[in-house]
Amino acid sequence: MRWLKDPLLWLIMLFIALLVGLPYSGPLFAWWFPEQARPLYQQESFLQLALAHLFLVITASVLALLIGAGGGVLVTRRAGRRFRPLVETIVAAGQTVPPVAVLAIAVPVMGFGAWPAVVALLLYGLLPILQGTLAGLDSVPASSREIADGVGMSAWQRLWQVELALAAPVILAGVRTSVIVNIGTAAIASTVGAESLGSPVIIGLSGFNTAYVIQGALLVALLAIVSDRLFERLQRWLSVSGE
């Protein structure tokens, strides 16, 4: 019964309970906000919004991981080291642009929907992953590389089996930051017609309906907390397995 004492399990159960229970919480919000004619968000189901939110975050995070980690590996190789300052500057500049501005630029090109939001989240999530990859690879001891060369490993084997394996906890820390930031940032995707848990928040703000804002913000915050605890558990496992 040890699993019943796991805080992460209880957080996951609470998130699921909210997804299932919020559609039936109309009387509670009607009592809390008696001035609101419609205190419960009902335009889409909360489960549908959560799945759409996860699609945006996961898609953008996978692309950011491929680009950020791939770029980090390339600029730490001998042939790509000269491009490291340029890559870091470009990626850092991408995060200084507000996501709303990226959406405003992407919508005329890509139209309304999920993909402009994915582009904004991708640009916003690149920097932590790139920095984590660079920091992780830079922290690999030179002796580990020398041992790998001494036993006859190829450059690819050394990278995959030694450098990335040792750098994995630091890289994962960058991924963790990127994902958590994007869970919150994905809420603005509703401004360009994409479904997300931010839909009740945006509609609530535009309609002065605080009940909608609370419902959406509560789910976004809890999703971020659950994701953060999952990454913490994975980082701990990688750190122990790497010892």
Image: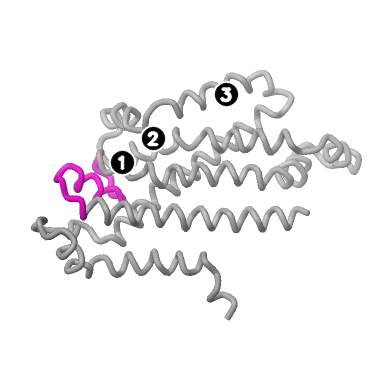
Which mark, residue 61?
none
* Helix, strand or loop under label 1: helix
Q: Is residue 199 magenta?
A: yes
Task: Please report the bounds of the magenta region as a residue range.
Answer: 192-211
Q: Residue at x 31, y 26 (%)?
A: 105
Percent across and percent down for residue 88 are 57, 24
Crowd rating for badge 1 (residues with CA inside 10 Å; few <14, some 14–19, many 20+): many
Q: What residue sits right under mark 1 in the picture?
A: 188
Sequence order check, earlier mark of 1 and 2: 2
Q: Please indicate whether residue 109 sits to the left or right of residue 178 in the image.
A: left
Q: Please indicate whether residue 151 sits to the left or right of residue 131 in the image.
A: right
Q: Is residue 92 above or below residue 197?
A: above
Q: Is residue 178 magenta?
A: no
Q: What residue sits right under mark 2 in the picture?
A: 120
Placement of the C terminus among the 4 image quadrants: bottom right
* Helix, strand or loop under label 3: helix
Q: Please indicate whether residue 199 sits to the left or right of residue 60 in the image.
A: left
Q: Residue at x 68, y 38 (%)?
A: 136
Farthest residue to the bottom: give it. 1
Percent across and percent down for residue 129 are 56, 38
Q: Residue at x 52, y 43 (%)?
A: 177
**Mark 1 belongs to which amino acid?**
Ile
Report the mark closest to the observer, 3 or 1: 1
Q: Residue at x 38, y 41 (%)?
A: 185
Sequence order check, earlier mark of 3 and 2: 3
